[in-house]
Amino acid sequence: MSNQVTIFDTTLRDGTQGEGISLSVEDKLKIAQKLDEFGVHYIEGGWPGSNNKDIEFFQQVKALKLKHAKITAFGSTRRKDIPPEEDVNLNKILESGVSVATIFGKSWDFHVHKAIQTTLEENLAMISDSVAYLKKNGLEVIYDAEHFFDGYKNNPEYALQTIKAAADAGADWVVLCDTNGGSLPEEVTQIVGHVVQVLDTPVGIHAHNDCELAVANSLAAVQAGARQVQGTMNGFGERCGNANLCSIIPNLQLKLKYTCVKPEQLSQLTLMARYVSEIANVHMPLNQPFVGSAAFAHKGGIHVSAILRHSKTYEHIAPELVGNKQRVLVSELAGQSNLVFKAQELGLDLDLQNEETKRIIQDIKELEHQGYQFEGADASLELLLRKASGEKVEVFEVDSFKIAVEKHKDDANVRSEAIVKLLVNQQEIYTVAEGNGPVNALDNALRKALVDFFPDIEQMYLSDYKVRVIDEKDTTAAKVRVLVETSDSQNSWSTVGVSENVIEASWNALVDSLTYALIGKSAVSRKEHVVERAGLLNH
Amino acid sequence: MSNQVTIFDTTLRDGTQGEGISLSVEDKLKIAQKLDEFGVHYIEGGWPGSNNKDIEFFQQVKALKLKHAKITAFGSTRRKDIPPEEDVNLNKILESGVSVATIFGKSWDFHVHKAIQTTLEENLAMISDSVAYLKKNGLEVIYDAEHFFDGYKNNPEYALQTIKAAADAGADWVVLCDTNGGSLPEEVTQIVGHVVQVLDTPVGIHAHNDCELAVANSLAAVQAGARQVQGTMNGFGERCGNANLCSIIPNLQLKLKYTCVKPEQLSQLTLMARYVSEIANVHMPLNQPFVGSAAFAHKGGIHVSAILRHSKTYEHIAPELVGNKQRVLVSELAGQSNLVFKAQELGLDLDLQNEETKRIIQDIKELEHQGYQFEGADASLELLLRKASGEKVEVFEVDSFKIAVEKHKDDANVRSEAIVKLLVNQQEIYTVAEGNGPVNALDNALRKALVDFFPDIEQMYLSDYKVRVIDEKDTTAAKVRVLVETSDSQNSWSTVGVSENVIEASWNALVDSLTYALIGKSAVSRKEHVVERAGLLNH
């Protein structure tokens, strides 16, 4: 049996059933282009019988010059009691102009009775007629057997009859779907094993993650003989999501030695995953396996000192194989070795015998004790480490800031105003600005003060803002930690501020953020910093 | 072999290794209390040899009257070439006063050479001496075999020698750890199967999610004979997280028919998971299996109409078994029945034909849409429902508030001032106060305005204050949700405020909090409310 596993991506169809996921035609075209470059074999673009947006996608996708992937359109078997020629759904697939159709039909007798309310015989005819009709029209046909595992567990003979009907009618693939996501790996192993024995047609797997087992079920199916895996980027999909191709592909390829994509394509996996998240406008979980920014991040001091000795000690694969990278987080749990490692990453030389360096390392630990959390604020930490290595990192000086927030019962709006006084290149700059809230007003006033000196500031925007009370026992008198993420067109960087006062904490994080971005752009310090600049924002 | 599986929760220790997860001693105590009620068997509280915060936890946890769970402290085997009596780590475990120690040692010959740099023989002695020392001091000992699977794959004889050393020295459990998270289910099945054959001591599994297989690996281990599962709530933990107990427990119990907790405890799983996320102040992914708010949410039109016919068609389990619920994302009816139910719980009669009641119910739904989260703010919801049932709930009227925050470089302090104008019993009250920050200042000014009318206010204090940005995409212009918890000597209650402005959101939550507390104490409304009063604060 071949070691090649065919990857069927349904991010653009099943993936968009996920809560909070919505893709425009333009979004879908961009993702299709990337999926093709990444090397998936099929791209399911949508359901032309279900909505007009999908019809438009199929029209426009023809203009993309895909090198590798086949575009496929989704639909159901014909409706009961009509001939396939008259079925709108099936004809929309033909009209979409794709060369591959993916149609689903019922495998579970319970569903035949309860959901589509017809006889078991008519359901078999619906499957057979639909596949034959599409084949007769020259299409490659992938048959998705909906609820196959539940159907098989309830009535194995009938479930097998349904996929035999598809195979006998000429289906090119029979894909077994765990639609409700309730199956366990050993069930998948046993049932797929049985199907590949009785069917000559190649078999695929389509799993859902309701038991947090979609990846395991997909691997089990391949090991039992399936040779197509259907899934989505980042596991997008309804309820708990579809099987996550970003985990399945590296597991199959790096651990189980199957072939899905080329090694150089696999090394684009992290980029691919993050690109899809960006386009879909959803947060990628930090801890997502293989591709998340924390997937190879190390926090504990023991781990870190071991990693400095040999990285295999705490990493199951080399992160570069999937285009990710190792990161060392600094935290209260870790010792000095994390800081030294971090400095090395930045190309900084920390002289641990130097009194000033020792003092700053001591400061960092003290700040952590106060509630700073540098693991989420690389840029603030970098500023401190650059100071520790003797660099000058101040780009402007703060004289004062002031905010006022006011609300009257006769006025629906709350008024927020900020006043900022800075010294930039020996000039005093005094600005005032409004905002939706005090932090937004401060941000606006600060940018207004700096934009003449650093026009690049217009390209930067706050991409994330988080507040956390550190010691809840003291509540409003307790310390507050603010994390700010700033982005420009290419990069993003995070900073932290801590204070008993949420306004001051926000201010500190905002100042760090702009300082970090501007170090390389400052006239005063350009000479010293221009070299580090590329590295600075390049992470 | 028994069907009972012992649950070992390490949210408070390994879970805090996760990026962005940081828990105060107070947080840890709250979570420990809930874990005990939920029915886990062991709660790993921290590493007393690693930091002072954990030592404080072990001191304070003694005051909690846990009904069921045993508290355990983590540590390593003794350092090389010293007797256990002189090992600080081991002695800190003894000093922590726990009855159960969990210590880890090396199983992988590669690690013995590279990480701790000693001989294979000395490593065996380190394990054996450490377990024996703790046993001699009367503790139950759980031995965590770090990197056991990697070690076994590299040198099975040596890996087995290490756990035999622990077992022979008297360890009560031997737990096999997939520390790097790189193992596959079939490897776990084979290796655990071998270990349970050669070892009399009960065996456990500790998996990590680097391949998105931690749940599958934990199930595989139990099916191969392991009887303890270590993991964390929501899968918190370093890199890609630990094995997620919120998925493992329902899989074991509902699918594989093992016993972990009582069915009535399992039905608290969703609440438990969300509580831990709230305390840790991290977003729970909507699509988290079993407990996420989208886990049983249906979007596709086909699914929804099928679900209306029969819910089993698209749900792998009844959501109520894990305390979750079905949601139909387009449904308008779902919200109303919940509110009616909640009102009934409070003894309120909602007349759904009444126009005012309809309007308030519509308001509540609109507020939820805006980002209010009444799940964490019972008191705010109760105020709204009382309004909906026709009660007068206003104790004072707000005319205006104003805050100013100011900081100059020559002054180490930030000055925060608040001005509040209220109408109480037709009197205009105008107060000004300072605070550590703007919210503290507002709170002080508000209390100053009310204390003469309601002296009980002096007994109340803010016991919790949480801020979350709801839509992080818009950053400082995004909506902010503030949750406030207020306590007096006997009770505590929570309120919520939402606004684009953190100050206004905090103000709304503060006003709700005091209003809720004062309803029963208001001269005007005392008569009507005195009966409900006991119930009011009694939850």
Image (cartoon, coloured by chain):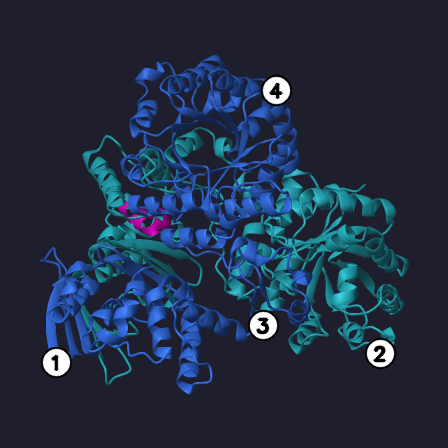
Chain colours: A cyan, B blue
Question: Closest to the observer: B258 or A399?
Answer: B258
x and y percentages locating residue B14 in the rendered image: 42, 39
Which residues make up the magenta segment? A374-384
C-beta proximity under 8 Å, tags 1 and 2? no
* Residue A517 vertical placement versus B14 (above, below): below
Q: Which amino acid does label 2 sit on?
A: Glu
* Chain that bears disc 2: A
C-beta proximity under 8 Å, tags 2 and 4? no
Q: Tell me whether marks 4 and 1 sit on the same chain.
A: yes
Q: Nearer the viewer, mark 1 or mark 2?
A: 1
Circle 3 sits in a helix, a strand or a loop, which is it? loop
- Residue that label 2 marks: A86
Alpha carbon distance from label 3 to label 1: 55 Å
Residue A445 in view here: no
Tag shown at residue B524:
none
Q: Which amino acid does label 3 sit on?
A: Ser
Q: In which quarter of the image is residue B67?
A: top left
- Residue that label 3 marks: A24
Q: Which of marks 3 and 1 is in front?
A: 1
* Residue A489 vertical placement versus A183 (above, below): below
Is residue B243 covered in magenta?
Answer: no
Q: Residue shown at 41%/71% (left/top)?
A: B343
Q: Main secondary structure of the magenta part?
A: helix
Residue A47 in view here: yes
